[in-house]
Image (cartoon, helix red, strand yellow):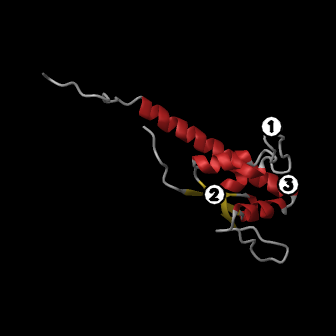
């Protein structure tokens, strides 16, 4: 059965009382958008080149919706309802270890959601399927 997922969110807790609000799942467009950002723009016929500046950050940024991270001024770094480029810039301005923690946390979440989706698929596959066609009694 092919399905459209209901958009859902999850709160992921970080050490020290910080938290992230992320998408539970990415849809196809979000997933492809994140993956396409791993490659630098090229012209037709050119060999694609990985964009190492954004590798790791692209998928995390696509999942990330909000957080309670504060800036140097003590005020929240507001990212909610901001475009992808803004959220990416916010991640890039963090301390490298903190940014890496956020990326690892979101990657672990993405992997857990993949395991959950696989389990859903397996449970649906084990169900008794009805025939796609009906037999007519003639």
Residue depicted at 81% across the width and 44% down the height: 43
Does residue 55 appear to the left or right of 18 in the view shown? right
- Residue 114 vs residue 84: left or right? left
- Residue at horizontal 83%, vertical 46%? 51
Tag of residue 45: 1
User: Viewer-nearest of labels 3 and 1?
Assistant: 1
Task: Depth check: give the residue in front, 47 or 32.
Answer: 47
Q: CA distance from mark 3 to mark 1?
A: 38 Å
Q: Is the residue marked by circle 1 packed among few (<14), some (14-19), or many (20+) residues within 10 Å?
A: few
Task: Name the image quarter holding the N terminus.
Answer: top left
Residue 22 badge: 2
Which picture quadrant has residue 137? top left
- Residue 7 in the image, given as x and y percentages of width and height: 52, 56
Between label 2 and label 1, give the one nearer the viewer.
Answer: 1
Report the residue at 58% width, 38% height from top: 115
Location of residue 45 in the rendering, given as x and y in whole percent from the top left corner = 80, 37
How many numbered markers are drawn?
3
Q: Nearer the viewer, mark 2 or mark 3?
A: 2
Mark 3 surroundings within 10 Å by alpha-carbon count, few (fewer than 14), some (14 through 19), many (20 or more): few
> On the image, numbered disc 3 is attached to which residue?
97
* Image height of 55 relative to 124, above or below: below
């Amino acid at each position: 059965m092919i399905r459209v997922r209901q958009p859902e969110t999850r709160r992921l807790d970080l050490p020290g009382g910080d938290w992230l609000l992320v998408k539970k799942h990415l849809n196809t467009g979000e997933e492809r958008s994140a993956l396409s950002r791993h490659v630098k723009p090229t012209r037709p016929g050119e060999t694609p080149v990985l964009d190492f500046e954004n590798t790791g950050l692209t998928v995390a940024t696509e999942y990330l919706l909000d957080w309670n991270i504060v800036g140097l001024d003590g005020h929240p770094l507001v990212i909610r309802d901001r475009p992808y480029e803004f959220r990416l810039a916010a991640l890039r301005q963090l301390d490298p270890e903190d940014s890496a923690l956020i990326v690892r946390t979101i990657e672990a979440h993405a992997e857990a959601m993949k395991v959950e989706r696989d389990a859903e698929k397996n449970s649906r596959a084990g169900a008794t399927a009805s025939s796609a066609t009906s037999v007519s009694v003639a």
